[in-house]
């Protein structure tokens, strides 16, 4: 039988998913201090569930699927709402969302029409996610605790746009090469 304590990382992931709604509501309402606190809690919970899973070997199929979904859900909602309330350019939210749609639909299409495919994060993908987390954190902090200079925010916006385009293109190229290899075998 699977001991209940091994479910602690999954419970933490579910709490992180549940935090998406209040973070979204606080951003929408302009309550950036509250959104910042919950975003930080979500970030800490992401590190904690990963640490517990690795340290005690409490891995599960559910956690492997739910953890990246929780991260992506929080980031996507933050980007969309920060763009909606005028804190981020709409074109940037469109790039980030478009990248995610391309990655998700590409992986799904490859999996169902070519062969089984486990999406593994690439280094450019990890850099892109880090830049997105950094930008959301800076925007939330800038509106609640510590105002950042506009040029810093603009520089991070540029990094997010660039890293999103590069990483999204990288996934497409990877699938295309795998498909060509599969087709030639």
Image (cartoon, grey):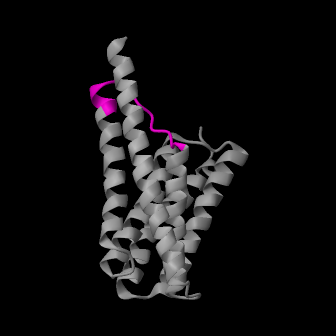
Q: Residue at x 32, y 31 (%)?
A: 110
* Residue 18 included in the magenta stretch of the image: no
Residue extending farthest right: 55
Q: Which residues are magenta?
A: 110-122
Q: Is residue 5 above or below residue 159?
A: above
Task: Write the residue at 55% across / 88% down.
Answer: 147
Q: Is residue 43 above or below residue 70?
A: below
2 displayed left or right of 136 = right
Horizontal side, residue 45 vs residue 154: left or right: right
Q: Is residue 31 above or below residue 171?
A: below
Taking the magenta stretch, the answer to whether it contains residue 121 is yes
Residue 17 in sight = no
Residue 54, x across and y down, in percent? 68, 46
Of the pair 71 and 135, the residue shown nearer to us: 135
> Which quarter of the figure has residue 164?
bottom left
Residue at left offset 31%, top offset 55%: 98
**Quarter of the picture holding the C terminus:** top left
Above or below for 176 versus 85? above
């Amino acid at each position: 039988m699977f001991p209940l304590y091994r479910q602690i990382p999954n419970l933490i992931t579910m709490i992180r998913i549940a935090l998406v709604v209040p973070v979204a509501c606080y951003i929408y309402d302009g309550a950036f201090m509250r959104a910042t606190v919950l975003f930080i809690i979500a970030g800490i919970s992401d590190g904690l569930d990963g640490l517990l899973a690795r340290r005690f070997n409490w891995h599960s199929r559910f956690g492997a699927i739910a953890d990246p979904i929780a991260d992506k859900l929080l980031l996507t909602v933050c980007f969309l709402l920060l763009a909606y309330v005028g804190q981020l350019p709409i074109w940037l939210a469109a790039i980030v969302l478009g990248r995610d749609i391309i990655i998700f639909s590409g992986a799904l299409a490859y999996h169902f029409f070519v062969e089984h495919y486990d999406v593994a994060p690439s280094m450019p993908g990890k850099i892109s996610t880090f830049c997105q987390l950094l930008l959301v954190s800076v925007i939330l902090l800038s509106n609640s605790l510590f105002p950042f200079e506009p040029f810093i925010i603009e520089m991070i916006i540029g990094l997010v746009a660039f890293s999103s385009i590069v990483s999204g293109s990288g996934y497409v190229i990877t699938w295309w090469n795998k498909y060509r290899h599969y087709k030639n075998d």
